Image: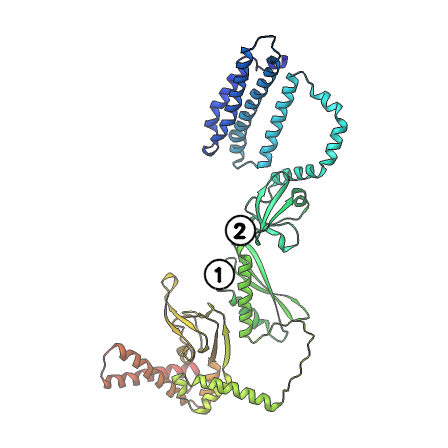
């Protein structure tokens, strides 16, 4: 027991030192960690109880020596626990400015308790060196049997020291996309990862230490995602790339900064492979966002009249006689002509002129929620709703409101078609909607052949505008007629200038 006197733990010195450390602990510990003072207090009370019991026994009692060793053991445990808490919170945490990894805390605490055990054995007259010498074979056997466990332990220490990821980070530890998940726990042997399928994967630390880890939450939560699509070679990238980029404009979850981009990735047997790149911040919703992106890309390609090429081994024979093709084309033109009759200023055109417009018209398909035109943008197209429904919105930001909904047979964008003026409202598809589109080029050909039709169009538009105005303001018949003439003159002048008519 000479070493006990040498380190000053004899008598009441050890108890006084333990009490002093316990008194200091509440001052050094954070508010949420002060409950940890209970353990040193309980250990010290056990020591005092054992010492008191020993003092009440006769000197020759056989329990005197075991009680002395047990009392020393609990005193050393109390000192070790208090010293560990003081060093951890007063020195390491405040110096490093962050939380010490749990595995490091457990290791340091384990080494302290191991030292307490060795000191207690020495106080009992057992030399630890003799135990280690006589158990060399046992140590080798245990070491070999625990090789994997020790490998995971040291790999866990390396992970905790380097901190390539933290709890809550999204990681991938191999090339299998099913092995992407959020870290929910780090311990001595393994790391637990929860996937999007709510499946918990337990990965050994040694596996992670050997893997090329991908951390999607570091250095920032912003992650780039990619969607690939193949387009036939006969379609120009000048038309395809802007359409693919516009398709991402209204997808929820895609960041505007960094902005999305489109590049030509490769030329394959299917066609030109485009790579659509976009950035997200909510990595947990990556599959939902990716699905919405692919949906919008499909609609964008449909509006361009592009079918996504896929490998096929099916041979089909079609009766593509010239007579049949002409019949199908005429049926499509007649259907479009019927739709044009629903537009008042086009209904006033001669049959042949309207038929030419029907031949030049095109169909466009929009997804639910997709933007068709934006308020304030320039444009020169008229849209007629063939099926579906669109909403007309006015205002900007949070003050935007729906002022009208248009269904089959209704139209919008007529003033941009005939005068080129900026869009007066925002229009968005509320359901999947098929629209008939008349652009400036189609109307230009009609007006070039019959310039006098510009006056017919301007008069019909002026009469409609005046009827809407008269519904809100009481006017005499003479005032209405004069206002129509004035509006007709103004519109006619704008139409002639927009279409370069004489």
Q: Kindly give the residue lying farthest to the right in the view shown.
A: 137
Give 289 or 40, whichever is nearer the viewer: 40
Q: Position of residue 426 (x, y in %)?
A: 41, 70
Residue at (50, 78) in percent of width and height = 363
Q: Residues within 10 Å of mark 2 (few under 14, many from 20)?
A: some
Q: Is residue 354 left or right of residue 486?
A: right
| Nearest to N terminus: mark 1 or mark 2 | 2
Look at 67% across and 16% down and name the residue there: 125
Q: How is the image coloured?
A: rainbow
Q: Nearer the viewer, residue 349 or 365?
A: 365
Position of 175 with respect to 423 (left or right) is right
> Which residue position is annotated with label 1?
252
Image coordinates of residue 18 in percent, x first then y, are 52, 20
The local secondary structure at tag 2 comes to loop
Is label 1 or label 2 in front?
A: 1
Q: Residues within 10 Å of mark 1 (few under 14, many from 20)?
A: few
Instruction: Name the residue rendered at 30%, 84% in the picture.
Output: 484
Q: Secondary structure at mark 1?
A: loop
Query: Is the C terminus in the top left, top right, bottom left or bottom right quadrant?
Result: bottom left
The count of marks equals 2
* Residue at which label 2 appears: 221
Mark carried by residue 441: none
Instruction: Tell me if residue 35 comes above or below residue 11 in the rendering.
Output: below
Residue 316 appears in which quarter of the rendering?
A: bottom right
Gap between marks 1 and 2 measured at Cα: 17 Å
x and y percentages locating residue 265 in the rendered image: 63, 65
Relative to 95, say whether 292 is above or below. Answer: below
Image quadrant in which you'd find residue 490: bottom left
* Observer-nearest of 53 and 25: 53
């Amino acid at each position: 027991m000479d070493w006990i006197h040498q380190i000053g733990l004899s008598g009441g010195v050890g108890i006084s030192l333990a009490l002093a450390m316990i008194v200091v602990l509440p001052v050094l510990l954070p508010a949420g960690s002060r409950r940890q003072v209970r353990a040193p207090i309980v250990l010290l009370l056990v020591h005092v109880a054992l010492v008191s019991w020993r003092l009440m026994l006769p000197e020759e009692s056989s329990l005197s020596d075991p009680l002395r060793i047990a009392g020393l053991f609990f005193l050393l445990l109390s000192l070790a626990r208090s010293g560990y808490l003081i060093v951890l919170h007063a020195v390491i945490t405040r110096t490093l400015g962050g939380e010490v990894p749990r595995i490091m805390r457990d290791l340091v605490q384990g080494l302290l308790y191991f030292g307490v055990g060795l000191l207690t054995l020495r106080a009992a007259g057992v030399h630890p060196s003799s135990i280690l010498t006589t158990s060399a074979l046992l140590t080798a056997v245990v070491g070999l049997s625990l090789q994997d466990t020790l490998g995971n332990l040291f790999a866990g220490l390396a992970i905790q020291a380097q901190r390539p990821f933290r709890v809550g980070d999204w990681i991938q530890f191999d090339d299998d996309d099913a092995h992407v998940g959020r870290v929910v726990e780090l311990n001595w042997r393994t790391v637990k990862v929860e996937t999007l399928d709510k499946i918990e994967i337990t990965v050994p630390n040694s596996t992670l230490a050997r893997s090329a880890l991908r951390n999607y939450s570091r250095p920032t939560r912003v992650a780039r995602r990619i969607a690939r699509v193949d387009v036939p070679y006969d379609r120009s990238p000048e038309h395809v790339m802007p359409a693919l980029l516009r398709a991402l404009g209204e997808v929820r979850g895609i960041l505007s900064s960094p902005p999305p981009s489109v590049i030509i990735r490769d030329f394959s047997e299917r066609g030109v492979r485009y790579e659509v790149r976009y950035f997200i911040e909510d990595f947990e919703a990556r599959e939902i966002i990716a699905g919405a992106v692919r949906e919008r890309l499909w609609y964008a390609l449909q509006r361009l009249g592009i079918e996504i090429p896929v490998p096929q081994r099916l041979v089909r024979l079609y009766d593509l006689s010239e007579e049949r093709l002409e019949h199908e084309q005429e049926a499509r033109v007649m259907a479009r002509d019927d739709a044009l009759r629903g537009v008042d200023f086009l209904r006033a055109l001669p049959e042949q002129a309207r038929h030419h417009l029907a031949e030049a018209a095109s169909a466009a398909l929009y997804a639910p929620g997709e933007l068709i035109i934006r308020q304030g943008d320039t444009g020169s197209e008229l849209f007629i709703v063939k099926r579906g429904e669109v909403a007309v919105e006015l205002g900007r930001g949070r003050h935007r409101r729906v002022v009208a909904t248009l269904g089959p047979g209704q139209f919008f964008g007529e003033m941009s078609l005939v005068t080129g003026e900026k869009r007066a409202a925002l229009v968005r598809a509320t359901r999947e909607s098929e629209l008939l589109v008349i652009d400036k080029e189609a109307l230009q050909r009609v007006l070039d052949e019959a310039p006098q039709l510009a006056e017919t169009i301007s008069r019909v538009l002026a009469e409609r505008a005046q009827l809407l105005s008269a519904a809100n303001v009481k006017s005499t018949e003479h005032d209405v007629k004069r206002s129509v003439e004035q509006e007709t003159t103004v519109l006619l002048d704008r139409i002639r200038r927009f279409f370069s008519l004489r």
